[in-house]
Image (tube, coloured by chain):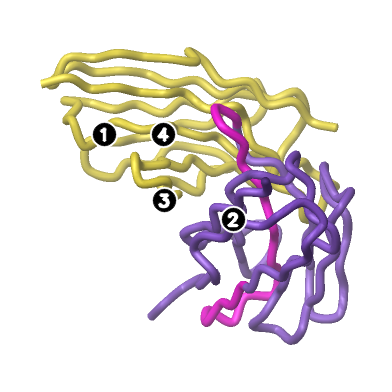
Chain colours: A yellow, B purple
Amino acid sequence: GIQVEQSPPDLILQEGANSTLRCNFSDSVNNLQWFHQNPWGQLINLFYIPSGTKQNGRLSATTVATERYSLLYISSSQTTDSGVYFCAVGQSGGYNKLIFGAGTRLAVHP
Amino acid sequence: NAGVTQTPKFQVLKTGQSMTLQCAQDMNHNSMYWYRQDPGMGLRLIYYSASEGTTDKGEVPNGYNVSRLNKREFSLRLESAAPSQTSVYFCASRDSHNSPLHFGNGTRLTVT
């Protein structure tokens, strides 16, 4: 099946810093999402982005499907950005399975 | 608009006991999913239902059964719980394979 790798596994930032999280996948996809799991365990949709670029406030994401990667940018980080960021992909032809990466654990310190 | 609702939020079972985790969505989505999340790991797909009346195995189906009761509800049953099934269980739904996935808040299950 499709492999999903996220990097870095852990990231520590000072409040106000910028960061880039990466998601590599091993096959063509028809679905890609970024999620934030907050310290209470809730999974929050950030972006549905199988291709192209989207922005939502301080967060933006870019997926280059032909090169099999996606990037999540966090600018001017805040302590509330702390948690785990997951990338999940749906393989083209694998009609309904959405497979998750292991996540990037982000800690933002004041 | 409640989205995806899971019950219970917490459960403790003894080895060998059975239980059913309930999930309901009010977004009229066609597809529903059960995932488990173990400490420090990503989510792994247990079972999914692409549409009402169908169910399929995911990555880790052993020890579980599911029922798609109707379009709104998708339950996960543990017939004989084992300590290896201690985990956080998430239900999710989406309209189609190229639409975003929406999660419930999870059920934290401990098997002693």
- Secondary structure state at the residue bearing disc 3: loop
Q: Which residue is mark 1?
A: A81
Across and down, in percent, residue A57 comes to 22, 42
Residue in view at x 81 percent, y 75 percent? B67
Disc 3 to disc 4, C-alpha distance: 20 Å
Amino acid type, mark 1: Asp
In the displayed structure, A45 sits above or below A38; it is below
Same chain? Circles 1 and 3: yes
Q: Which residues are magenta?
A: B23-41
Q: Residues within 10 Å of mark 3 (few under 14, many from 20)?
A: some
The numbered mark at residue B68 is: none
In percent of the image, x 42 and y 23: which residue is there? Answer: A105
Mark whose residue sits in front, 1 or 4:
1
The residue indicated by pointer 3 is: A42
Residue matched to label 2: B90
Whether the magenta-drawn stretch holds residue B33 is answered as: yes
Residue at position x 28%, y 45% from top? A56
Please, what is the three-letter code of the amino acid marked with disc 3?
Answer: Gln
Q: Position of residue B25 (x, y in %)?
A: 56, 77
The chain to which mark 4 is attached is A
Q: Which residue is mark 4?
A: A61
Question: Mark 1 touching mark 3, by CB under 8 A?
Answer: no
Residue at disc 4, secondary structure: strand
Distance, label 1 to label 3, CA atoms, is: 13 Å
Q: Residue at x 82, y 43 (%)?
A: B60
The chain holding disc 1 is A
Q: Position of residue B15 (x, y in %)?
A: 77, 51
Q: Is residue B53 visible?
A: yes
Q: Give the mark toward the camera: 1 or 3.
A: 3
Question: Where does the image place residue A34, in percent across and percent down from the top left?
Answer: 48, 40
Is-magenta flag for residue A44? Answer: no
CB contact under 8 Å: marks 1 and 4: no
